[in-house]
Image: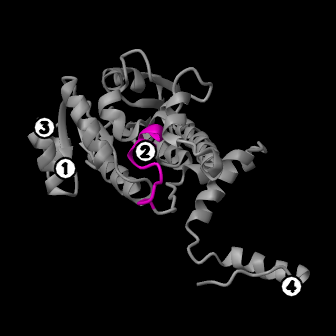
Amino acid sequence: MRIGMIGLGRMGANMTTRLLAGGHEIVAHDRSAEAVGTAVASGAEGADSLQSVIAALPAPRVVWVMVPSGEPTEETVTALADLMQSGDTVIDGGNSNYKETVRRGQSLSERGIHFVDVGTSGGVWGLKEGYSLMIGGANDAVGSLSPIFETLAPTAELGWGHVGPTGAGHFTKMIHNGIEYGMMQAFAEGFAILKKKEEFGLDLHQIAEIWQHGSVVRSWLLDLTAEALKQDSELADIAPFVSDSGEGRWTIAEAIDLDVPAPVITHSLIARLRSRDEAGYGDRMLAAMRNQFGGHAIKKAT
């Protein structure tokens, strides 16, 4: 199958490599000429513009967009819509907000262009292990793309599926990432408690390895935790700053809209936000209030 790949960041580049290894032909484009050159060295055909990508693809065309969510995706999809024809398909494999995906799908549908959203999980390990793919879109469009999904997934039968209409793929991935936030926070808090119990002299890497086998908390996330602890159990070179890419916020907003309580996911997002408060003004205010009403000692800043 001949596919256009727009966006050759780490995820897009890895997906390109996996598709090439699976026998697909790739026409690759990125704003970075260096990234395009790397893709060409791997066997892809390079393109210096969206117009060149479209010209190099047979009808009906299939273009996979793997650019950052928000304005970059909006600009790319809008530009492709003006270049493509009825019967063509645009795939958004990024982490777009599902509401924007639904809107884009409706807009492209009016032109006869299919829009398929693919929530993609697997991170930097997807090249080797395969990607988990949560797919939204019309039945006929998704069905025709199955060779792509079978190549990108861990196996042809496992790790991917058509979960619903346009928007359903990104919605499912959003909730997936919200759950991920909660799982990560639970592991982080548990290991922090273990580390604090200094009199036992616990080896956190050893404990993580024990839990990897037979434990009810065994998981790929635990495997990655064990590897991080093996490299540096003190995590001394890592700043306590945790970013977020938006899906946790969207999940919490959706939970509020649907009147579904989600305290664990909500707390995990708040913990990430707190990690970025280098000034710690809120914590200093708490100390000041305790001093005012109870005369509690204040630890002076150094």
Q: Is residue 49 above or below residue 281?
A: above
Mark 4 or mark 1, earlier in chain: 1
Callout 1: few (<14), some (14-19), or many (20+) C-alpha neighbours within 10 Å? some
Q: Is residue 235 magenta?
A: yes
Q: Are marks 2 and 3 in contact (CB under 8 Å)?
A: no
Kind of residue sitting beneath label 4:
Gln
Kind of residue sitting beneath label 2:
Ala
Q: Foreground residue, 76 or 11?
A: 11
Q: State the image coordinates of residue 257 (x, y, percent, origin top left).
A: 73, 48
**Residue behind mark 1:** 51
- Residue 288 lies left or right of residue 173; in this view the side is right
- What distance separates the C-alpha of mark 2 from that of mark 4? 43 Å
Q: Is residue 59 above or below residue 100?
A: above
Residue at (34, 25) in percent of width and height: 145
Q: Nearer the viewer, mark 2 or mark 3?
A: 2
**Residue behind mark 2:** 228
**Residue behind mark 3:** 42
- What distance separates the C-alpha of mark 2 from that of mark 3? 30 Å
Callout 2: few (<14), some (14-19), or many (20+) C-alpha neighbours within 10 Å? some
Q: Which residues are magenta?
A: 224-238
Callout 4: few (<14), some (14-19), or many (20+) C-alpha neighbours within 10 Å? few
**Residue behind mark 4:** 292
Q: Quadrant of residue 61?
A: top left
Kind of residue sitting beneath label 3:
Ser
